[in-house]
Amino acid sequence: MARLNEIYQGLEFNNDGELDLATGTIAPIKFYELMQREIDYSKRAKAPLTVISTGVAISESSIYWVEKSDISIEESELLISILLDFIINTSFKITGTLRSSDSMARLGVLTFAILIRDDLKSGEILSSRINTVMEYEFNVLTSELQKSTLKGINLEIITCTSSYKDNWTLSEFLNSASL
């Protein structure tokens, strides 16, 4: 796992407590605080609240391949560059599909969360738009990987939408969206 850890570290999952430094989206701790405030508001106002998670998962076979292969430092750096371009471009384009009242955070190396003050149906409509962005950027990403010696890496888009249910804790709400 050392090689994969080096690659993940190269993907700049750093924040200043407020924003993710690579994407400009909300930092995880700030997002969790925002979610808790929104849950509290939702309880008081009986207002709908929906969270969408989206990201890219690296298959177990790809993790094994990266760990056991003899990819060079240059190839590792190329993979980092390709994935970082994907993260930044995806974040920028998803942010462009959101309303000013929606909030987006980078919660993992390759994972984003979007919080909206709306019902599940609206969340699913937004999720569909996000999937369109993800699929386009994913196709660019896989095309870049296919041009390199890294074509053995298999990735998958994962998106989940969930609406807040009465009396859920923050943890339960996050788990419902696979976060």
Image (tube, rainbow, N blue to C red):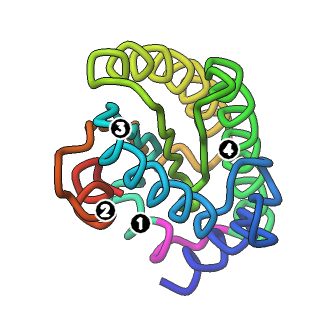
Q: Amino acid at mark 3?
A: Ala
Task: Indicate yes or no whether the magenta region holds residue 70.
Answer: yes
- Marked residue nearer the N-terminal end (2 or 4): 2
Identify the mark at residue 60; answer none if there is no mark: 2
Q: Inspect the image, locate mark 4, and give the three-letter code of the amino acid beneath it.
A: Ile
Q: Position of residue 76 (x, y in %)?
A: 70, 64
Asked which secondary structure carries label 3, the reply is helix
Q: Residue at x 71, y 20 (%)?
A: 96
Q: Does label 1 or label 4 sit earlier along the sequence?
A: 1
Q: Is residue 75 above or below residue 89?
A: below
For the residues bearing labels 2 and 1, Cβ distance under 8 angstroms: yes
Q: Residue at x 58, y 32 (%)?
A: 102
How crowded is the residue under tag 3: few (<14 C-alpha within 10 Å), some, or many (20+)?
few
Which residue in the structure is indicated by mark 3? 45
Viewer-nearest of discs 1 and 4: 4
What residue does disc 4 label?
Answer: 87
Segment tinted magenta in the rendering: 66-71
Which of the two marks, 2 or 3, is nearer to us in this view?
A: 3
Residue 56 image point, x, y percent: 46, 45
Dot 1 or dot 3: first in sequence order is 3
Label located before the other in sequence (2 or 3): 3
